[in-house]
Image: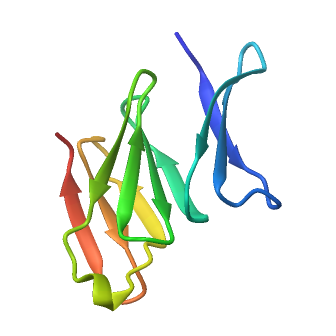
Amino acid sequence: MVHINCYLIDNMPNTVWIWEVTSLSLFSVAVQLKPVKHFVWSPSSHILAIATENSKIYILTLDDASVCDIPIDSKLNIQMSKCQWNVDGKSFIISEKVITFFLHQW
């Protein structure tokens, strides 16, 4: 079983460093175009959700990566600030200063 954790370094705000904890080795690096505002692991699986300063949520697994484009008007200049998984790990919410979105995992 893989035990992983991730970190954000202050002087590299666009980069999430994902480490395999038991061997203390670098597992992956997720470099984003915009600064990362928040990231959180699913409570039930190795799925990482990353919110950045745009209207997209980035989903990473141990084998794959995808992007979820939030269907909003680009003129609103939405910047996601936090995401949180449901306790079952099958859905999550994303919040911005005034708007909250609910997403159900595929």
Position of the C terminus by quadrant: top left
Kindly identify the residue that appears in the image at 29 percent across and 82 percent down.
Answer: 74
Whether residue 75 is visible to the viewer of this picture, yes or no, is: yes
Does 6 sit left or right of 68 as displayed?
Answer: right
- Taking the image as drawn, is residue 86 in sight? no
Residue 90: image location, x then y, percent: 23, 42
Vertical comparison of 99 with 67: above or below = below
Q: Residue at x 27, y 60 (%)?
A: 69
Q: Is residue 21 left or right of residue 85?
A: right
Whether residue 18 is situated above or below residue 63 in the rendered picture: below
Q: Nearer the viewer, residue 66 or 41?
A: 66
Residue drawn at 21 percent across, 44 percent down: 105
Drawn side of residue 104 relative to residue 4, left or right? left
**Direction top: furthest residue:** 1
Q: Is residue 62 placed above or below 43 in the rendered structure?
A: above
The image quarter in which residue 100 lies:
bottom left
Could you tell me residue 71's position as x and y percent? 19, 70
Residue 87 picture location, percent across and down:
32, 47
x%, y% of residue 93?
A: 30, 63
* Left or right relative to 88: residue 8: right
Which sits in the foreground, 38 or 34? Answer: 34
Residue shown at 30% from the left, 89% from the top: 75
Number of marks in picture: 0
- Coloring scheme used: rainbow
In this orientation, which residue lies closer to the viewer: 30 or 93? Answer: 30
